[in-house]
Amino acid sequence: MQLAYRTQRVAYPYFLVALPLFLLQVVVGIWLAASYAFTMPQWLVDALPFGTTRAIHTNLLVLWLLLGFMGSTYFMVPEETERDIFSPRLAYLQLIILAGTGVAAVVGFVFGWTKGRPLLEIPHPLDYLIVVGALIFLFNVGMTMIRGRRFTITQGALLGGLVFLALMYLFNLPFYRNLTIDWYYWWWVIHLWVEGAWELVAAALTAWILMKITGVPRKVVEKWLYVELGLFLFTGIAGTGHHYYWLGAPDYWLWVGGIFSALEPLPIVLMLLDAMRFMRKRQIQTNNRVVYTFATGMAVLHLIGAGVWGFVHTLPMINYYTHGSQITVAHGHLAFFGAYVLLNLMFFYYAIPKLKGVETFKESRGVVAFWWTSLTMIAMTLAFSVAGILQTYIERVMGMGYMTAQAQMRFWFAILVVLGGLFLIGLVILIWDLFRLRPLEDLEQRA
Ligand code: HEM
Ligand code: HEM
Ligand SMILES: [Fe+2]
């Protein structure tokens, strides 16, 4: 099978770089849980402090997810615009700049070279390289769309999300001497990324995949993109207020933040339900079981991780107790996993077979990898949540000491080490499957 456009091939190296970074992220995650569960020798703590490994874990996450989005964009845009990518060379150059900068940053963390802002520890000078990489990306995608034969709302939502994503990163560049102000703008990046820009990117990529694998007409899925755009403006932006409780912002934010943020993940779920309704009515079956599994799983876990686990601590009177606890961490894991990890994996399972020229392949391994990683991540979220409830109750309701709470939480981190190990096995199956995909005919011949 041929790719519709030759330059879609630039997506492949993005995926090839993203997946091993994901693997490394998870290994470091298990290490983090182990450092809560067991007492490490002091020399090891000195060599690799918790703050350093945490920075590696979270920055690798952001890096590989972004590389995945970019690869997916390069794969999708030619088919949407009906034009090849403006410059494949620039796309490769951009990958080298961004992946190189990311890896340099992670190595730098080990030597204490860090800006110190959680999730965005990348040191200042390297930020400029990120900006250069992002500008090349936007230029390349923008030029492809300008020269395209067709403009669709799917492309528009994608480009809008990507431009907003890049703009928000600029708030990470200055440093404010007043730490409260610094944190205030930190949220503009963190929150407006995951609950604003990335949601738009996710909705656009999901709309496109649904059109491809279900045969549902464009207008059925695209109308939800308008809803997503509207909600992004109302809930995503106003919802930033759920982070202002602790920053000395005016107290009307308590209500604005609490109410608006609860509605965010709805459009993608509604898009999928609408597509399913359409398929049932016309008795259409999906032509790609494994991608469909990832798509439904994503919609459900996005709703639970971001919507439910986000909502439980979004109201001010609850956040008063849970702020910055393991409840936050539980939400962080399931929301990132449900919304953006599964989104990327869904796209990889759609694009990689095509990039390899594989028409039909054994889909069952991908489905197993989906259930394996999803169920272990749900279990991890529950374990983080139990640790968080203990922490909140002992420390903040009972007012007892930090270490008293930690002593009770330890057991749950030991469980997390085990669950993390299980997650890792599922991930290895997934990566192994994606890298070794062979056409079904080959497999039959060999048997
Ligand atoms: C896919 C979307 C989302 C992702 C990936 C995500 C991820 C995260 C992460 C990683 C943090 C922790 C940041 C830190 O302090 O280090 C966080 C905090 C928070 N999230 Fe989300 N989130 C999402 C959507 C939502 C939604 C929809 C809500 C509300 C319904 C929400 C409510 C909150 C709140 C209230 C906090 C602050 C917790 C605290 O005070 O410690 N999130 N989110
Ligand atoms: C599978 C094994 C994993 C384990 C054992 C693990 C464990 C941990 C631990 C212990 C922390 C530090 C929490 C703290 O500061 O107290 C952490 C942070 C974090 N991890 Fe993982 N992790 C794993 C995989 C993942 C995956 C797959 C994702 C992406 C979905 C992820 C996303 C995050 C995020 C966003 C944070 C920051 C949370 C926050 O600031 O609230 N982790 N992880
Ligand atoms: Fe937020």
Image (cartoon, rainbow, N blue to C red):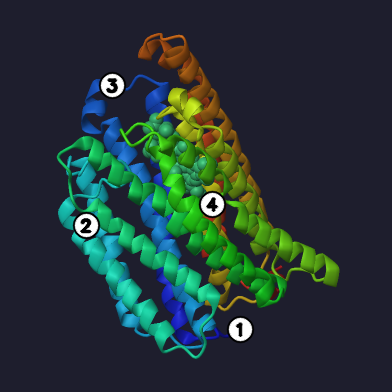
Q: Quadrant of residue 97?
A: bottom left
- In front of the other: label 2 or label 1? 2
- Left or right of 387? Residue 59 is left
Relative placement, left or right, of 251 versus 307 is left
Where residue 329 sits in the image (x, y, percent)?
Answer: 45, 34
Mark 3 is surrounded, within 10 Å at the Cα level, by few (under 14), some (14 to 19) or many (20 or more) other residues, namely few
- At label 2, the amino acid type is Asp
Residue that appears at 34% across and 84% down: 87
Residue 358 locus on image (x, y percent): 60, 75
**Label number found at residue 41:** 3
Some atom of ligand 1 lies within 8 Å of the CB belonging to the residue at label 4: yes
In the depicted structure, whether residue 369 falls above or below residue 81: above
Residue 378 falls in image quadrant: top right
Q: Which label sits on residue 127?
A: 2
Q: Which residue is at the front of the view, 121 or 32? A: 121
Q: CA distance from mark 2 to mark 1?
A: 40 Å
Which secondary structure, mark 2? helix
- For mark 1, does the 10 Å Cα neighbourhood hold few (<14), some (14 to 19), or many (20 or more) residues? few
